[in-house]
Amino acid sequence: MRAMVLKAAGQPLQLTELPVPTPASAQVLIQVQTCGICRTDLHVVDGELAHPKLPLIPGHQIVGTVVGKGDQVERFQIGDRVGVPWLGHTCHHCRYCLTGRENLCDWAQFTGYQLDGGYAEYTVAEESFCFPIPSGYPDLQAAPLLCAGLIGYRSLTMTGDAERLGLYGFGAAAHIIIQVARYQGRKVFAFTRAGDSQSQQFARELGAVWAGSSDELPPELLDAAIIFAPVGALVPAALKAIAKGGVVVCAGIHMSDIPSFSYDLLWEERSLRSVANLTRRDGEEFLALAPKIPVHTQVQAFPLEEANTALNALRSGQIQGAAALVMER
Ligand SMILES: [Zn+2]
Ligand SMILES: [Zn+2]
């Protein structure tokens, strides 16, 4: 099979011919149709996340077809369409697994980081961490639901019933979460890089009541903000924009250092928290909700061998909505 492989952090991925993997007893073998590109993939490739498996096939928003399975697989049949998310394995017995917080498992393994992912024609995945894909979604449109959608949804739930919601960074996750937030009756305020009028326009088209630069204050104070961009300076900016009792949720896995800020910004019961990974329950809830709204995703497709081009486009802010690799056979 053809795969785009990371041999060392900081280097471009290399198109490599590899044997098709063999599923272990609890794994399915998946013929990959498409694999979404996530900012986390950039952090892995750039060496900002420590100790990836090397060599590594990145990619954790995989949509494909089951073409083989191990002897213990019961949930899926040959021919089923499945999605593979970031959470690829948990231990089932640590204190986090036993208390409904498998996203924090001490021995979790993540797809496209410690496990080979979907920048390839085939992959294997533990069946219990795969999701059925809602039938109304074409493969390409389903891919960004699996991380941008799912971790965005977990972040949104951390804002409680906040009515006035700020989204910092209007990329793949925000373009999905604004649709969920609007469906729930919230008012969304979108913040982008200064001068990115295209993304601001995109946010307004998706129903933002206001869109502007992340160094501006919104026209009214917010009840909550989610920071999707990996920029630490957005933390004090978002704290300034929220009202008393509000929450700022950092949704990314990596962020540049947060500049020091005055305690005033946190005072009056404002809170600041991160969201890490996902639980399978998040996935089940979100994939049931998305077709009801229905969430529409905008996805720019790239051929597998252009993964480096796609990652560079994401890095420089040239992707409107989401991006995904598509296997051409
Ligand atoms: Zn565990
Ligand atoms: Zn991701």
Image (cartoon, helix red, strand yellow):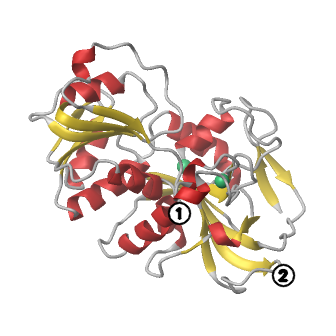
Percent x, y of residue 14: 79, 43
Q: Picture quarter containing residue 33?
A: bottom right
**Mark 2 near ligand 1 (CB under 8 Å)?**
no
Work out whether residue 76 or residue 279 is closer to the camera in this orientation and state it.
Answer: 279
Badge 1 density bin: few <14, some 14–19, many ≥20, Cα 10 Å? many
Percent x, y of residue 254: 53, 33
Q: SS class of the residue under badge 1?
A: helix
Which residue matches tag 2?
71
Which residue matches tag 1?
143
Whether the residues at callouts 1 and 2 have beta carbons within 8 Å, the answer is no
Q: Is residue 303 visible?
A: no
**Residue type indicated by callout 1:** Ala
Q: Nearer the viewer, mark 1 or mark 2?
A: 2
**In which quadrant is the N terminus drawn?**
bottom right
In the image, residue 86 sits, relative to residue 192, either above or below, namely: below
**Mark 1 near ligand 2 (CB under 8 Å)?**
no
In the image, residue 72 sits, relative to residue 128, either above or below, namely: below
> Residue drawn at (74%, 47%), measured in percent from left and top?
114
Q: Picture quarter containing residue 34?
A: bottom right
Q: SS class of the residue under badge 2?
A: loop
Q: Left of 169 or right of it: where is 247?
A: left
> Residue drawn at (63%, 66%), measured in percent from left and top?
129
Q: Left of 182 or right of it: where is 111?
A: right
**Residue type indicated by callout 2:** Asp
Q: In the current view of this chain or complex, which residue is farthest to the right?
A: 19
Percent x, y of residue 225: 28, 39
In the image, residue 289 sits, relative to residue 116, either above or below, namely: below
Q: Earlier in the sequence, mark 1 or mark 2?
A: 2
Work out whether residue 32 or residue 66 is closer to the camera in this orientation and state it.
Answer: 66
Please tell me how many numbered marks the rendered image carries.
2
Q: Left of 243 or right of it: where is 265?
A: right
Work out whether residue 158 or residue 326 is closer to the camera in this orientation and state it.
Answer: 158
